[in-house]
Amino acid sequence: MIRVVLLLPVAALIAACSPSGPEQLLCTFDDKGRIVTQSGNAEAACVEPAPIPTGATQEQSGRLTILEAPLPPPFSDLGEKLPPDPVNSKPVLERFAVPPELSYYIRAFPQAAEPRGAVLDLGSQHTIVLRDGCFFLDREGADDPLVFFPYSTALVMDEEGYLAFGSRYEPNRMGSVRVGLTAETGWFGEPSEPDPALAEACGNHKVVSVTTVSNPFNPPDRFTSALRRYGERSGATEKQIVERANKCAVEQAKREADRRLRNPALDPIDCNRFWGF
């Protein structure tokens, strides 16, 4: 495993969209994987990078590439859930959109400097991939645009070790959608030119701004009525409904990745019989 840390000027691009604060020292490593400390800095003063996320490829640059990820089964039961109690306390904002232990693997995470208010999660679905430390919207064709993220989006590691997009407003919540899976991206305008820092980090690609990066299956209980209707038509039990819907969703995500990355001639898998609205 390569553990290379290149402290590039583009670090300022990542930090520019995060609240200011004391700069944390980043560890570097020699060819035997031992921490190399800067003169006068104790080993304990630096932040060691996180383990390589599950399914990621580390490039010669030390940055990561993630083109696909498996979909976790989105449904667990068909129970009716009560709405959560209103929260009166002000949410705690996570300081880092890219935690220091993950910043080793990312060239840039361009992001809005402030919230833009309420946005519509629905609107479009795209797959956001990571290529050598840069995030691209994976579209048909070879000229994919870079992604400019909303203020609320942060990078996290989910329960199974996959790199995922989470929320800066809910730092204790694991990722809502994995990098390399289809996400709700809301609305965005026409591609624009990158600013100089982003172009230096990731190349002179067009940039698109998304208004959200969220899980299409979240919250899963919004599918409950449609899944129950499927059960009424098919005579399936609740356990069978959940198992069949999960199986179809997971296979559909895998087929989408195969069509994107390996064979666009493959037929898509249609799961609308379970949650068609």
Image (cartoon, rainbow, N blue to C red):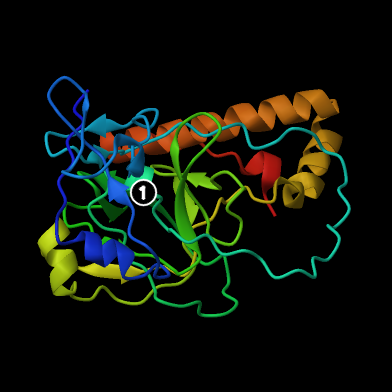
Q: Would residue 53 be visible to someone looking at this image?
A: yes
Residue corresponding to mark 1: 100
In the rendered image, residue 224, in percent from the top left (x then y), is placed at 79, 45
Q: Nearer the viewer, residue 84 or 88?
A: 88
What residue do we see at 22% from left, 23% from top? 1
Q: Residue shown at 70%/55% (left/top)?
A: 277
Neighbourhood count class around disc 1 (C-alpha, 10 Å): few under 14, some 14–19, many 20 upward? some
Residue under the image location 62 percent in, 44 percent down: 272
The spot of residue 173 in percent (x, y) is: 61, 47
In the displayed structure, 128 sits above or below 162; it is: below
Among the 4 quarters of the image, the one containing residue 167 = bottom right
Kindly indicate the quadrant of the structure image that contains residue 126: bottom left
Q: Is residue 230 left or right of residue 122?
A: right
Q: Where is residue 104 in the image (x, y as percent from the top left)?
A: 27, 44
Residue farthest top in this picture: 32
Q: Residue at x 29, y 53 (%)?
A: 135
